[in-house]
Every structure is written in structure tokens, then in C-alpha cells.
Image (cartoon, rainbow, N blue to C red):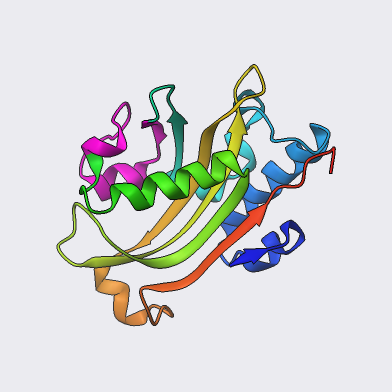
């Protein structure tokens, strides 16, 4: 569902996601309402998201490679996914979905926010998660990075989760440019 960028902070329910989005929005304004560069990100501005944080690089060949993964992401995968491409991390059936989601963040550009269930590599049962993905530019101003945080809920806590279906929220916030 497409939503206005002005509703992003009110839609986010996790403190770490709000901290990350607030930092990104501040940099967006400081950058003249353009997608901020990766070099401007200060992880100390979103301490509650650090364990769940990740950065993905869009490579020239169309693949997506993990640049950074927080401790919770390493635990989720059962190893450090840094340097690995989506094709090395995910089942072939979900690759088109992940590529489409990542391309939308970069190409639109837009911010994606989802609350849903997924199959986690280190867990036998589906896991609930909240995820935010924000676009970032490289040094030349090209949008080619995704900054995000995925907060997973342990399968033991699934019964306590407020999530009632496989997709509770799938929100997209198109980023207006300074020229708009």
C-alpha cells in the first residue's frame, strides 16, 4: 500500500525503526530533499536498531550483496552473511520477491516497511518480523544501497505476537525529490 512519506514515523511501531527513519529523514532534508549518501549515515543515531541493522549494495551486474549485518541478523542466518549475495542466502522461490522489493527501494526511490512472517534459515518454523528498508546514494549520487533493520521475533514468542496473518503491513513511501 502506498503511503505519504509524512506518515512514515507514525506507522513505525518499533523504537529502533523510528530512530533509523528519523536519522534518514534528517539527512534527506539536509541533502536538499534528495536520497542521502551512505557516507552520511551515523549508526550512533539509531542505537536501538544496531543489532537488527543491515546494508545491502546493488551491484552493477544486478545482484544484491550484503555489506553489513548486525548481530541479530548473524544469529538469524546462523553465520555472518557479509559479502554474500541474495542467491547465496535465500531459496530460489523467494529471490524474485526480494529482488523486486530491493529494486523498488532503489528505483522509485521509496522506503519499504513490512510486518509479516518468513522462514528463517536458523529456525525450523516461520518467524515474525518487522522490516524497514531505506535507499542510500553512493559518492556519485547514484542510489545503490539499502539501509535497513529487520527485527525478528523468536518462534517461541509467536503465540504472543500481534501478527495475525503472513502479511500484516506492506507500506511503501515514495520519496519526493527536490524538483517535485
Residue 41 shown left or right of residue 148 in the figure: right
Residue displayed at 36% across by 73% down: 166
Residue 77 shown left or right of residue 37 in the figure: left
Residue 100 shown left or right of residue 10 in the figure: left
The extreme left residue here reads: 124
Specify whether residue 89 is painted magenta: no
Specify whether residue 68 is painted magenta: yes
Q: Quadrant of residue 118?
A: bottom left
Residue displayed at 55% across by 45% down: 105
User: In this view of the protein, can residue 179 be seen by the observer?
Assistant: yes
Residue 19's place in the image compared with 8, above or below, is above
Residue 126's place in the image compared with 177, above or below, is below
Q: Nearer the viewer, residue 13 or 48?
A: 13
Image coords of residue 57 (percent x, y) = 45, 29
Residue 161's place in the image compared with 63, above or below, is below
Magenta extent: 63-88
Residue displayed at 53% across by 39% down: 147
Image coords of residue 159 (percent x, y) = 30, 81
User: In this view of the protein, can residue 16 be seen by the observer?
Assistant: no
Q: Image quadrant for the N terminus?
A: bottom right
Q: Image quadrant for the C terminus?
A: top right
Q: Quadrant of residue 24?
A: top right
Q: Quadrant of residue 142?
A: top right
Residue displayed at 51% across by 48% down: 49
Q: How many callouts does the rendering have? A: 0
Amino acid at each position: 500500500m502506498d503511503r505519504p512519506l509524512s506518515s512514515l514515523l507514525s506507522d513505525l511501531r518499533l523504537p529502533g525503526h523510528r530512530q533509523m527513519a528519523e536519522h534518514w529523514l534528517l539527512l534527506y532534508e539536509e541533502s536538499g530533499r534528495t536520497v542521502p549518501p551512505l557516507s552520511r549515515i551515523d549508526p550512533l543515531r539509531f542505537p536501538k536498531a544496531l543489532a537488527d541493522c543491515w546494508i545491502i549494495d546493488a551491484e552493477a551486474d544486478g545482484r544484491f550483496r550484503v555489506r553489513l549485518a548486525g548481530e541479530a541478523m548473524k544469529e538469524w542466518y546462523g553465520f555472518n552473511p557479509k559479502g554474500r549475495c541474495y542467491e547465496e542466502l535465500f531459496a530460489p522461490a523467494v529471490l524474485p520477491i526480494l529482488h523486486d522489493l530491493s529494486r523498488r527501494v532503489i528505483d522509485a526511490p521509496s522506503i519499504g516497511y513490512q510486518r509479516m512472517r518468513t522462514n528463517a534459515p536458523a529456525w525450523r518454523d516461520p518467524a515474525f518480523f518487522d522490516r524497514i528498508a531505506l535507499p542510500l546514494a553512493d559518492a556519485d549520487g547514484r542510489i545503490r544501497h539499502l539501509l535497513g533493520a529487520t527485527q525478528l521475533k523468536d518462534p517461541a514468542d509467536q503465540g504472543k505476537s500481534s501478527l495475525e496473518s503472513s502479511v500484516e503491513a506492506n507500506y511503501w513511501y515514495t520519496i519526493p525529490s527536490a524538483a517535485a
